[in-house]
Image: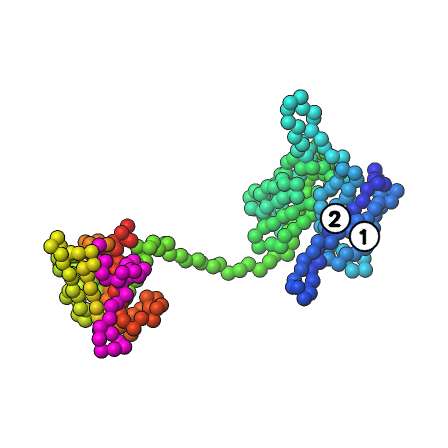
């Protein structure tokens, strides 16, 4: 039966560029139905566009409409009354009932081959996946004209409009759109996430293999049997090491390490790094903060020409000493 008080809402998007950049805006047009339920929409800027019918609180779903140039396209809408839930007893929560319409059907290619694994859905939320025979069923769909969307790998998305009657099952045969080009298979390779300890060990090994600088491993330090962290450096060529002692042993500022300066004939104090961070007091506090058995590795670079770039941000004219703590490997 024609609905004279109804209207059809058309929705499309327009894109444009201006001095502020790219814009994409939603446009909407409304066509009122006449006494016989007829409506007319002049071709909007976008093709295809989406439209739905409305009357009071009742409406259909959005369906896609394609209009050919200089032609008239006729699209009918079936507008069903809004389904309401039964009244609940006092104190209970009232919830909207699900739709009572049902859609069944098959999805095939243009050559008649059934398509398994295609996703079939309606905007109201019902969705299903086709079986090996290409069959699907959507339950609890709102009655009236609804848009059904179908997506399958290797095919362009397909949209069809279905008129649903309350409490009834509608059967539809959906033919997928054009087959789209499939990209070649891509193989993605990855490596396990590197921990901080593994990264430190790898960097130490690579620099030692490169052969610039002097290196001491934990095994080297153990063979020397040093009495303190400072004494580890006694036999490193190019370093001048001294310790001041009190009657009770090593004092609180006991260690002094120097090396020949690259900018003068004298000596200079190298920057000492512990786990990649410079020690504020240089070598003087080594015996207070470190024991020889806690060291994983030591690197000694005797001038700017030897220093790795990542450790020479200050542009020091002296060398540097890198000390790596074993706890970093845990």
Q: Nearer the viewer, residue 294 or 89?
A: 294
Of the residues under marks 1 and 2, which one precedes in the sequence?
1
Please report contact status of discs 1 and 2: CB closer than 8 Å, yes or no.
yes
Evaluate whether residue 177 shows in this view.
Answer: yes
- Residue at 16%, 64% (x, y): give it: 242
| Up/down of 113 relative to 256, above or below | above
Residue range of the region highlighted in magenta in the rendering: 260-288
Specify how the rendered protein is coloured: rainbow
- Residue at 76%, 38% (x, y): give it: 58
Q: Which quadrant holds the N terminus?
A: top right
| SS at mark 2 in the image | strand
Evaluate whether residue 214 shows in this view.
Answer: no
- Residue at 16%, 62% (x, y): give it: 243
Q: Nearer the viewer, residue 235 or 112?
A: 235
- Residue at 81%, 44% (x, y): give it: 7
Tag 1 residue: 41
Question: In the picture, residue 24 is in which quadrant?
Answer: bottom right
Residue 93 is situated, as x and y percent measured from the top left of the image, at 64, 27
Disc on res. 51: 2
Q: Is 58 on the left or on the right of 94, as rendered?
A: right
Decide: few, some or many residues near mark 1? Use Cα within 10 Å; few <14, some 14-19, many ≥20.
some
Gap between marks 1 and 2 measured at Cα: 10 Å
Q: Indicate whether residue 272 is drawn in magenta.
A: yes
Decide: few, some or many residues near mark 2? Use Cα within 10 Å; few <14, some 14-19, many ≥20.
many
Q: Is 281 on the left or on the right of 131, as rendered?
A: left
Disc on res. 100: none
| SS at mark 1 in the image | loop
């Amino acid at each position: 039966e024609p609905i004279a008080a109804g209207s059809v809402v058309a929705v499309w998007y327009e894109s444009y560029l201006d001095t502020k950049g790219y814009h994409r805006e939603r446009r909407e047009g409304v066509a009122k139905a006449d006494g016989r339920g007829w409506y007319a929409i002049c071709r909007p800027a976008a093709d295809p566009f989406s439209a739905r019918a409305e009357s009071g609180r009742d409406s259909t779903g959005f369906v896609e409409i394609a209009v050919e140039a200089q032609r008239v396209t006729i699209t009918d809408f079936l507008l069903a009354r809004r389904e309401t839930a039964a009244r609940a007893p006092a104190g209970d929560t009232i919830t909207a009932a699900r739709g009572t319409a049902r859609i069944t059907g098959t999805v095939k290619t243009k050559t008649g081959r059934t398509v398994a694994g295609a996703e079939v859905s309606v905007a109201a939320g019902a969705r299903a996946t086709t079986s090996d025979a290409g069959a699907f069923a959507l339950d609890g769909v709102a009655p009236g004209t609804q848009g059904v969307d179908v997506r399958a790998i290797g095919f362009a998305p397909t949209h069809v409009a279905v008129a649903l009657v309350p409490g009834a099952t509608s059967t539809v045969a959906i033919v997928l759109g054009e087959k789209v080009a499939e990209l070649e298979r891509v193989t993605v390779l990855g490596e396990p996430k590197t921990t901080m300890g593994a990264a430190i060990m790898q960097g130490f090994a690579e620099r030692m293999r490169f052969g610039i600088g002097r290196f001491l491993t934990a095994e080297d330090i153990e063979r020397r049997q040093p009495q303190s962290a400072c004494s580890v450096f006694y036999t490193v060529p190019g370093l001048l090491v001294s310790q001041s002692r009190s009657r009770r042993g090593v004092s609180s500022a006991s260690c002094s390490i120097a090396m020949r300066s690259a900018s003068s004939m004298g000596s200079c104090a190298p920057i000492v790094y512990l786990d990649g961070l410079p020690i504020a007091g240089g070598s003087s506090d080594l015996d207070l903060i470190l024991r020889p058995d806690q060291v994983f590795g030591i690197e000694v670079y005797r001038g700017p020409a030897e220093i790795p770039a990542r450790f020479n941000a200050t542009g020091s004219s002296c060398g540097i000493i890198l000390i790596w703590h074993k706890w970093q490997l845990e």
